[in-house]
């Protein structure tokens, strides 16, 4: 029989890591909107290209420094998983979040993070055979209602159906990335996994920049070296979000199950993002958006309390 105190002590560091990463994820859309605002520093394409190239040295150094010795056998399945995670991270989460933030309001982008738990829970149930409880199934249904209500609600902050759809696609790739990291963490050190898929994703973003003729986007943070760029691009998007958030998530996934990690991430991200969108961008929620937020928060609660905190393989004892 499990000791509740021992379980709490074992999971507390991972829970704190998730909540810390949630702040960085919640500020993602706010940082993008702040950099798009007049006088404009970036457009969505130049933002994800610059972010990829500037993040590349950090991920590469991390992968080299944490490379396991001796290196485990790298099967073709693992090669495919690393490539999948790199695609999901670079052209997926980075590019789609930048494009989505440019086409919808920051508050919509933040509230739609609540779709992350149902998406990740469904994928975990399908591919990793993690148990999907009745509460989580109910949470998925409530979350769908909330997302539909939010998308159909009117906003005075420039939201759009296309922008909301891009954010939804970003969340799907984030859920795929989370599952891939979970599987790779079983065979490789978590920091190495982050460094490897981050390097692949950053290289792909740089390649997209070259293909689109946007390679000069790399120079924008140097040309526009004012405090706004340093705060939102250098610190938030490159250091805290790209590297710090991924490291904290990788650490947490070693001991917590996916549904718990994504639910805690969504709760923290929504709280931090809505607070920042009001304080930094002056956005306010309409009555329809408040109703949608109530549905979405309820869905998160069902997802969070619908199962055990700990990873299934570590829950016994």
Image (cartoon, rainbow, N blue to C red):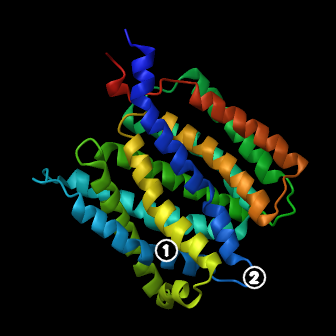
| Quadrant of the rendered image containing residue 45 | bottom right
Q: Dot 2, crowdedness within 10 Å: few (<14), some or many (≥20)?
A: few
Regarding residue 112, the answer to whether it shows in the image is no
Q: Residue furthest right?
A: 287
| Label 2 – label 1 distance at C-alpha | 20 Å
* Residue 59 placement, left or right of 110: left
* Residue 240 placement, left or right of 192: right
Q: Position of residue 178 (x, y in %)?
A: 43, 48
Tell me the quadrant of the picture where the N terminus can be found. top left
Q: Position of residue 176 (x, y in %)?
A: 45, 50
Give the mark, 2 or 1, whose residue is nearer the N terminus: 2
* Residue 128 placement, left or right of 25: left
Q: Is residue 282 above or below residue 17?
A: below
Of the pair 89 and 310, the residue shown nearer to us:
310
Residue at left offset 68%, top offset 38%: 143
Of the pair 280 and 1, the residue shown nearer to us:
280
| Quadrant of the rendered image containing residue 136 | top right
Q: Circle 2 sits in a helix, a strand or a loop, which is it?
A: loop
Give the residue number, with chain letter if any, for mark 2. Answer: 38
Q: Position of residue 266 (x, y in %)?
A: 60, 44
Tell me the quadrant of the picture where the C terminus can be found. top left
């Amino acid at each position: 029989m499990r000791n509740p105190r021992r379980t709490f002590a074992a999971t507390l560091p991972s829970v704190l890591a998730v909540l810390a990463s949630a702040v960085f994820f919640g500020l993602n859309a706010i940082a993008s909107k702040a950099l798009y605002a007049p006088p404009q520093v970036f457009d969505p394409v130049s933002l994800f290209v610059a972010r990829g190239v500037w993040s590349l040295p950090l991920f590469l150094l991390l992968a080299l420094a944490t490379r396991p010795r001796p290196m485990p056998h790298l099967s073709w399945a693992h090669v495919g998983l690393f490539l999948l995670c790199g695609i999901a991270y670079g052209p997926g989460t980075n590019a789609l979040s930048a494009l989505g933030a440019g086409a919808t309001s920051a508050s919509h982008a933040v509230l739609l993070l609540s779709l992350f738990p149902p998406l990740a829970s469904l994928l975990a149930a399908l591919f990793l055979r993690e148990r999907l409880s009745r509460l989580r199934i109910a949470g998925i249904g409530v979350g769908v209602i909330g997302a539909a209500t939010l998308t159909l609600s009117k906003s005075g902050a420039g939201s759009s159906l296309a922008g909301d759809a891009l954010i939804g696609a970003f969340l799907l790739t984030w859920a795929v990335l989370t599952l891939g990291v979970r599987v790779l963490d079983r065979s490789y050190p978590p920091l190495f996994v982050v460094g490897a898929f981050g390097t692949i994703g950053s290289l792909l973003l740089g390649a997209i920049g070259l293909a689109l003729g946007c390679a000069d986007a790399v120079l924008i943070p140097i040309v526009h070296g004012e405090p706004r760029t340093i705060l939102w691009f250098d610190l938030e998007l490159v250091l805290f979000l790209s590297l710090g958030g991924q490291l904290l998530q990788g650490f947490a996934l070693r001991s917590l199950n996916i549904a718990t990690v994504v639910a805690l991430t969504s709760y923290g991200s929504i709280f931090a993002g809505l607070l920042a969108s009001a304080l930094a961008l002056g956005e306010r929620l309409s009555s329809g958006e408040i109703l949608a937020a109530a549905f979405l928060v309820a869905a998160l609660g069902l997802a969070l309390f619908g199962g055990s905190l700990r990873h299934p393989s570590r829950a016994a004892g």
